[in-house]
Amino acid sequence: CNLPQDAVYPVAMVDAAGRRLTGASTYVMRFPAGELPPVNGFWSLTMYDADYFFVDNPINRYSLSPRDSLKANPDGSVDLLIQH
């Protein structure tokens, strides 16, 4: 079990415009150059269903993190694509 001072689990249910997230849309989480989450351990982006189980998908990818060898854009920013 993680201690509260060691882990943060923010949750998003709506997009930047306040619309409920849906698999019919494509979302981009953009980190400007040099601004990936500042952590003393690791971070990941994980998608859960309404019952807080991993969302099944055909490529069996259940999280994105720096362990996935993220590729920066030409300007140094990093985009995480969230889509069906």
Image (cartoon, grey):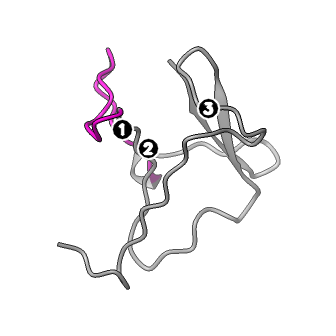
Relative image position of residue 83 (x, y in whole percent): 55, 23
How far apart are the alpha carbons under marks 3 and 2? 21 Å
Give the magenta part as a residue range: 50-65
Q: Earlier in the sequence, mark 3 or mark 2?
A: 3
Per the image, the residue denoted by label 1 is 48
Name which residue lies at 27% across and 81% down: 3
Dot label at residue 64: 2
> Which is more toward the observer, 76 or 22?
22
* Residue at the extreme left of the image, as rendered: 1
Considering only vertical position in the picture, is 50 above or below 76?
Answer: above
The answer to whether 37 appears left or right of 45 in the picture is: right
State if disc 1 and disc 2 touch (CB < 8 Å).
no
Name which residue lies at 82% across and 48% down: 75
Q: Earlier in the sequence, mark 3 or mark 1?
A: 3
Image quarter of the N terminus: bottom left
The answer to whether 69 appears left or right of 53 in the picture is: right
Secondary structure beneath dot 1 equals loop
Per the image, the residue denoted by label 3 is 20
Q: Residues within 10 Å of mark 1 (few under 14, many from 20)?
A: few
How far apart are the alpha carbons under marks 3 and 1? 14 Å
The image quarter containing residue 2 is: bottom left
Q: Residues within 10 Å of mark 2 (few under 14, many from 20)?
A: some
Name which residue lies at 61% across and 32% down: 20
* Residue at the extreme right of the image, as rendered: 75
